[in-house]
Each structure stands twice: as structure tokens, then as C-alpha cells.
Image (cartoon, grey):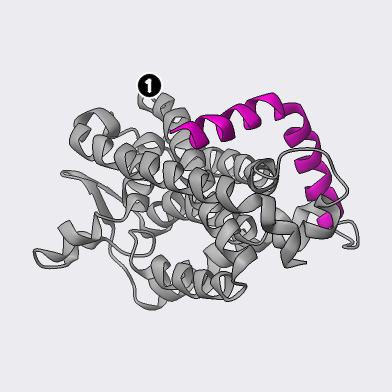
């Protein structure tokens, strides 16, 4: 508990630094491209179109029933989940290698190492906000207007950020000690795409598989995003038991990640 509290205090105390360095990270990453930061949006849009073409057009997917009596075209259902998946995947992958790829710089800097994963996460978060804005605009044009239920999107954004940071504390520490962890994580997340309700509904599975799939906390976040965008209800309140489960998992991951990080970070420079 003490380790988690210290890590959280470091994030709050260095928030201005995190925000500045995350913007620099985003700009420097794309400075050699002609289109610059536009690629941060173009790349996921291309991915969405590919998945829609493969899973929607070629297979001629029928409308998806978001809630009983309310169906939407597959492309909008896909977009509602994929906008979160893109942020989650990129933030976790980049966060996992955030420390060991910057060890040489960190040895000359004077700020807590726990802010490094957050800098990378924030740089991906800006892109997520742009994609979310584009998604909302598309929904408005398509007739899925913003309702009062959209307010819960801020709760699910915070929940996503919390989970990503907790996971990144664990993976960035382990990846610094054992570099193969990053490669294993990359392969695992690619598989997780097909084990999450991003490309298809888990309701088509027979029991008890849907219940098992819901163990994945990403399911909670994706369905929450869709509930907010389509305005189908207060997902976090209607599924309050699932909300408690999600936060239990997220907090346990943060406690474990903070303790792991605090235990090994004094030795990180030894892995140069």
C-alpha cells in the first residue's frame, strides 16, 4: 500500500513534467514524417477499415444488437470498441518498454522513474482523444446523437487510464529485467484482440464461455464505451457487480506493480 501511495504522489507531483514530456514524445516520434502526427490518426483508421472489410463486408455481418431491441450496423459497433482498443494496445506496448529504452537518459535525469510509463501513456492518450472526437462526430452524422449517458465516457476514460498505468508499472519493470517480456506481451495482446468483444460479440458463444471471457477487464471497458456512445444506459451502475470486480482487479494490479517497481528501480541502471 505504501509503495502505491508513493507512486501516485510521484505522478501528482510531476504532472506538469509528464504533460510536457508526453507532448515532446509525440512530436519527436513523428518529426521525420511528411504528414507528422497525422499518422497517429491515419494508422488506426486504416486498421478499422481493414477489420470492417474483413469481418463486416466480406462476411456480410448482420446488424449487431447492442441491447435488446436496439441494433446498429457492424461498422459503428466495431468503431465503438476499436477506438478504446487502439489506445489500450499502444499504451501498454509502449509503456512496457518505456523504461529500458530510456535507461541511458534516466541515469542523467533527476525525476522518479515511475513517471516514465505515464509519459508514454499520455502521449498515446492525446491520440485517443482525437480518435474519440472523430468517432463522436461520425456517430452524430449517422444519427447516434449524444445523450445524457455519454457523461459516463469520462468515468471509463479514467478507468482505462488507471488499468493501463497499473499494467505498465508491472510490464515496464519486468521488461527491464527480462527483455523477452516485451515480446511475449506483444504476442499476448495480439491474441487478446480476438478474446475481447472488439471484432465479435461474445454472446454468440455457449455458456460458460461468455462468463469466462468477462474475466478480462477489457470487456468491461469496451462495453462501457459502447454504452456511452450509443446511449443505451448507465453501464457502470447497471452492472455494479462487474464494476466492483473491475476495480478490485485494477487496484490489485496497481498495488503489485507499484511494489515491484519500487523494489527494483534502484537497480534499473545496472541493466544498461
Label 1 Cα crowd, 10 Å radius (few <14 / some 14-19 / many 20+): few
Question: Which residue is at 61% across, 39% downward?
Answer: 129
Q: Can the viewer see residue 139 in this picture?
A: no
Image location of residue 18, percent across then percent down: 73, 36
On screen, residue 85 versus residue 129, left or right, reads left
Give the magenta range.
Answer: 1-29
Q: Does the magenta portion include 242? A: no
Question: Which residue is at 19% across, 61% downward?
Answer: 212
Label 1 residue SS: helix
Residue 193 occupies quadrant:
bottom left
Extreme residue toward the left, this view: 207
Q: Can the viewer see residue 39 in this picture?
A: yes
Residue 233 occupies quadrant:
top left
On screen, residue 241 versus residue 110, left or right, reads left
Mark 1 highlights which residue? 148
On screen, residue 159 versus residue 91, left or right, reads left
Is 127 or 91 nearer to us in this picture?
Answer: 91
Q: Quadrant of the C terminus?
A: bottom right
Image location of residue 146, percent across then percent down: 44, 28
Question: Which residue is at 55% across, 63% downward?
Answer: 174
Amino acid at each position: 500500500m505504501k509503495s502505491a501511495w508513493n507512486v501516485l504522489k510521484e505522478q501528482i507531483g510531476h504532472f506538469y513534467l509528464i504533460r510536457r514530456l508526453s507532448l515532446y514524445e509525440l512530436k519527436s516520434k513523428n518529426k521525420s514524417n511528411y504528414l507528422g502526427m497525422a499518422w497517429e490518426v491515419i494508422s488506426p483508421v486504416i486498421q478499422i477499415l481493414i477489420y470492417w472489410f474483413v469481418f463486416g463486408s466480406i462476411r456480410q455481418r448482420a446488424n449487431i444488437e447492442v441491447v435488446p431491441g436496439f441494433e446498429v450496423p457492424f461498422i459503428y459497433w466495431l468503431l465503438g470498441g476499436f477506438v478504446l482498443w487502439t489506445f489500450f494496445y499502444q499504451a501498454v506496448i509502449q509503456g512496457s518498454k518505456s523504461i529500458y529504452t530510456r535507461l541511458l537518459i534516466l541515469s542523467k535525469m533527476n525525476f522518479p522513474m515511475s513517471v516514465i510509463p505515464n509519459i508514454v501513456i499520455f502521449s498515446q492518450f492525446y491520440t485517443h482523444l482525437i480518435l474519440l472526437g472523430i468517432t463522436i462526430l461520425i456517430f452524430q452524422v449517422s444519427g447516434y446523437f449524444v445523450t445524457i449517458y455519454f457523461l459516463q465516457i469520462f468515468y471509463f476514460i479514467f478507468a482505462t487510464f488507471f488499468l493501463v498505468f497499473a499494467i505498465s508499472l508491472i510490464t515496464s519493470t519486468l521488461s527491464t529485467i527480462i527483455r523477452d517480456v516485451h515480446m511475449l506481451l506483444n504476442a499476448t495482446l495480439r491474441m487478446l484482440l480476438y478474446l475481447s468483444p472488439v471484432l465479435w460479440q461474445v454472446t454468440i458463444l455457449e455458456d460458460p464461455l461468455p462468463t469466462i471471457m468477462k474475466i478480462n477487464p477489457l470487456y468491461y471497458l469496451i462495453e462501457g464505451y459502447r454504452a456511452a456512445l450509443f446511449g443505451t444506459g448507465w453501464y457502470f451502475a447497471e452492472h455494479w457487480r462487474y464494476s466492483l470486480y473491475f476495480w478490485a482487479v485494477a487496484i490489485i494490479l496497481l498495488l503489485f506493480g507499484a511494489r515491484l517497481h519500487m523494489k527494483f528501480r534502484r537497480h534499473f541502471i545496472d541493466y544498461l
